[in-house]
Each structure stands twice: as C-alpha cells, then as structure tokens.
Image (cartoon, grey):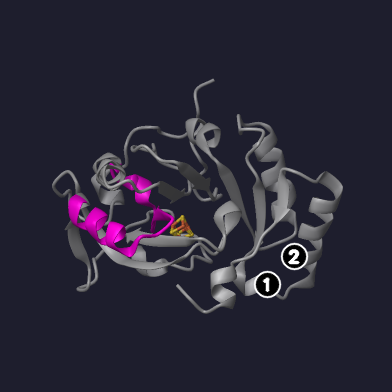
Amino acid sequence: MKNKNNSAPPKKSETGTRAGNAGVYPVFERFHSWQGEGAHAGRSAFFIRLFGCPIRCAWCDSAGTWGDVPPASLENLSAETLAAEAAAARPDFVVVTGGEPAIRDLSPLCAALRSRGLRVHLETSGAFPIRGDFDWIALSPKTARLPLAENWARASELKIIVSRPEDIAFWSEKIARERVAPDAPIWLHPEWSQRENSAVLDAISAQVRARGFPFRAGWQLHKLYAVR
Ligand code: SF4
C-alpha cells in the first residue's frame, strides 16, 4: 500500500535556506563529543548539525535550527571541508544530525566522510527520503510528520520520545504495523522536561518489564554530563 506521506524530496520552502550547490551544507554547529543516546551511547563521535527543520516539535531541544531566517553564525561548508575536520578529530564515527538533516541530499557528505575511512550515522525523524549511504540510522518518529514506510524499514534503532505515558501505547501500535527490523532496539526516552515525572518513568519501566526486547529504557546521558 502506498504510504500516505509524500516521498518526494522536501520543497525548497522546507529546507530553511535557499537551494545551494550540491555538496555544500548549511552547518548550524559541528563538534567532537560523545554519543549520549541509543546503542552507541558513550562512544566518541563527531557531530555535524545541519540547519533547517520544518517539523517543529513542541519540546525540540535544537529549535535554533528551525529558523526561517538563517542565523548570522551559519556557515555553508563543503562536504570535503566537513570530512577533513571530522577525520582530524579521529572519532569512532560521525553523526549527521539537525534539525532534520534528511531535507537535504546527504549523498555527497556521506561519500566524503567514507573516503576518509569514517563510519557515518544519521539521526532523523524519517519524514523525508534518506539520500546517502549510512552505517547506522537512528530514527526518532514525530507525530507532526510521520516517517515514510521505507524509512521505518531502514532504521537501525528507534528512539521514542515519551512526554506522556500514553505515548508508549501510541508508538508501540504504530511500530507493530510497520516493517521495522526485528533486531532494531526501540529506546523509550523520557522527554527531557519530564525526566523527573514518575508517571512517565514508571510507564517506561512497565513497558520494558512487560515486553522486553526490542524495548529498552533510554536516557540522554550527554545532558547529565553537561556536554553537547
Ligand atoms: S524533528 Fe527533531 S529537530 Fe525537528 S523539531 Fe522535532 S525534535 Fe526538533
């Protein structure tokens, strides 16, 4: 059955910037730190955070990437420049994130990173076609714009943001209807502002106890350490 979402690439009005040259990306920030979430938590990672996201979740922790008007600090950098910086940091892997990085063609960036022997991870909502060759895809679905069917199937892991206990049942039922890889962990992360909400934490614990794998209780470790 055809997915209800439009699997065409995003419109220019959704990218947050005017169309640029192929292989040149609006970079909100890039830095060497470590992965704070998911199956690769605790590992050295170089993050490339691209500008632009048309989804606009109420609790977004990177809302600075949304803007209709790019910030003055925004840099347009080539895939080769980003790959050279990432390689110099000697991370375990590179994380391409946002914003929503998949609103852009990430193929040139992946190719440049791979040419330097770097493994490439993607963090995405899954709402747009994924263009690029990735070693790992962390898909964090959002109700405001559901993932494409093809992206559920490509996910290496799922990250569900739980802001209310009922979010767990909603996403569990949704995932059960999609072609998700059976070995893909489903992380249940308390939304950060709800991290001390016992109803949310207890609901996550109950789901993991009741269902076991692929459900896993998650946390944003980098925020505990106060690193980016
Ligand atoms: S999809 Fe991600 S970057 Fe976009 S608004 Fe939602 S949380 Fe923020």
Q: Nearer the viewer, residue 183 or 139?
A: 183
Residue 16 picture location, percent across and down: 27, 56
Location of residue 49 by image quarter: bottom left
Location of residue 133 by image quarter: top left
Q: Nearer the viewer, residue 214 or 1?
A: 214
Q: Which mark is residue 195?
A: 1
Residue most toward the bottom?
Answer: 226
Q: Residue at x 19, y 46 (%)?
A: 23
Q: Is residue 132 magenta?
A: no
Residue 80 picture location, percent across and down: 19, 51
Q: Residues within 10 Å of mark 1 (few under 14, many from 20)?
A: some
Residue 144 versus residue 45 in the image, above or below:
above
Residue most toward the left?
Answer: 21
Q: Nearer the viewer, residue 70 or 80?
A: 80
Q: Which mark is residue 121?
A: none
Q: Nearer the viewer, residue 185 or 51?
A: 185
Q: Residues within 10 Å of mark 2 (few under 14, many from 20)?
A: many
Badge 1 amino acid: Arg
- Whether residue 104 can be seen here: yes
Residue 19 picture location, percent across and down: 17, 48
Q: Is residue 31 left or right of residue 5?
A: left
Q: Cβ of disc 2 within 8 Å of ligand 1?
A: no
Q: Residue at x 52, y 79 (%)?
A: 226
Q: Residue at x 66, y 47 (%)?
A: 186
Badge 2 amino acid: Val
Residue 54 versus residue 194 in the image, above or below:
above
Q: Is residue 90 magenta?
A: yes
Q: Cβ of disc 1 within 8 Å of ligand 1?
A: no
Report the residue marked by disc 2: 200
Q: Report helix, strand or loop for mark 1.
A: loop
The region drawn magenta spans 80-106
Residue 211 picture location, percent across and down: 82, 45
